Image (cartoon, rainbow, N blue to C red):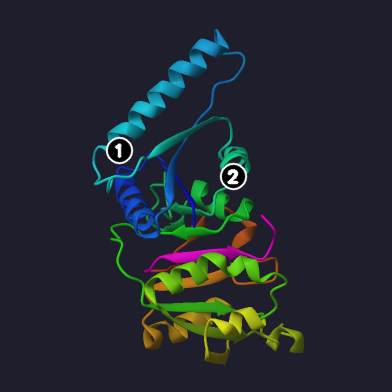
Amino acid sequence: MNNILVPLGTSPDAHQTLQYAVDFAADFGANIYIMDVFTVTSGTGSLGNVQEKVAESGRENVKGIVAKIDAKGLDIKIASYNGDIIDGLLEIKKELGIDLIILAPRSNDVNEANYLGNTSGRIIKQTNIPALIVPKETSYSPIKNILTAFKSGILKRSKILYPLVSIMKKHEANVNLLLVKTPSYSEEDLQINTALMDISKNLTITENATTYLGVLEHFRTKHPDLLCVFRRKRGFFKKLWEKSTVKKSEFFAPVPLLVLSVKKY
């Protein structure tokens, strides 16, 4: 992984997510960018001057957050964008080539009942960039045990496993594959991609109403440091993708969650 992007919200705990991302980037020898998004419309005074003032204010705020962490000697860069955060992510991805987004489950949302807030939920839902969702107060540490859960073993491109494989190799982690047969499964779903099988020989097949229920059933026995799932139309978050916010009653991960997309990004 070469380039990691951290979208910082207004949460008072934003520095915790940034510290995790910096520690992660330092471990992988990656570049790290902080995304600062603001909105200045053309009807706001002298657009150029106002936009620069708002951008500068945002940069100062980011610098204040950076001052709270141990930068590990990294040159932390700020990527500012005027407009919607999703458009900004896609633009920055195109310009810089982002390999991974590291973010908090709720960057701005104050509703403790939610696992994913509106902003974080939109990022996961509306982009195909691999994302690592880091729970509040989580410190970076070696990842030794990974649970990869899915309801279909079909992967058209093995490249989507790159972030997972990178983490696995870096920490010499054990990967447990969990195939959850839901009521809507097909025989084709049981044909697991060879690239997926190559990273682990530990395969468990279970039957549950949903993939998430399968994860809950096996989470305690597997004791993962990282949970990995795939984002696809007919996959782990099939229903959750219909909205941006996700309640903890619908889904909750007490460990970092790596979300990989089967779509090209």
| Type of amino acid at the residue the image marks with label 2 | Lys
Question: Quadrant where the C terminus lies?
Answer: bottom right
In terms of image quadrants, where is residue 66? Answer: top left
Give SS at disc 2. helix
Front residue of 91 and 250: 91
Question: Does residue 137 appear left or right of residue 90 in this picture?
Answer: left
Q: List x then y, in percent, for residue 77.
A: 41, 37
Question: Does residue 259 appear left or right of residue 248 in this picture?
Answer: right
State the residue at coordinates (41%, 41%).
9
Q: List x then y, in percent, for residue 176.
A: 48, 84
Cβ atoms at labels 1 and 2 below 8 Å apart? no
Question: Is residue 231 visible in this depiction of the protein?
Answer: no
Front residue of 155 and 9: 155
Point out which mark residue 93 bears: 2
Q: Which residue position is annotated with label 1?
A: 65
| Type of amino acid at the residue the image marks with label 1 | Ile
Give SS at disc 1. helix
Q: Nearer the viewer, mark 1 or mark 2?
A: 2
Point out which mark residue 194 bears: none
Q: What residue span does the magenta drawing correspond to?
A: 254-265
In terms of image quadrants, where is residue 259? Answer: bottom right
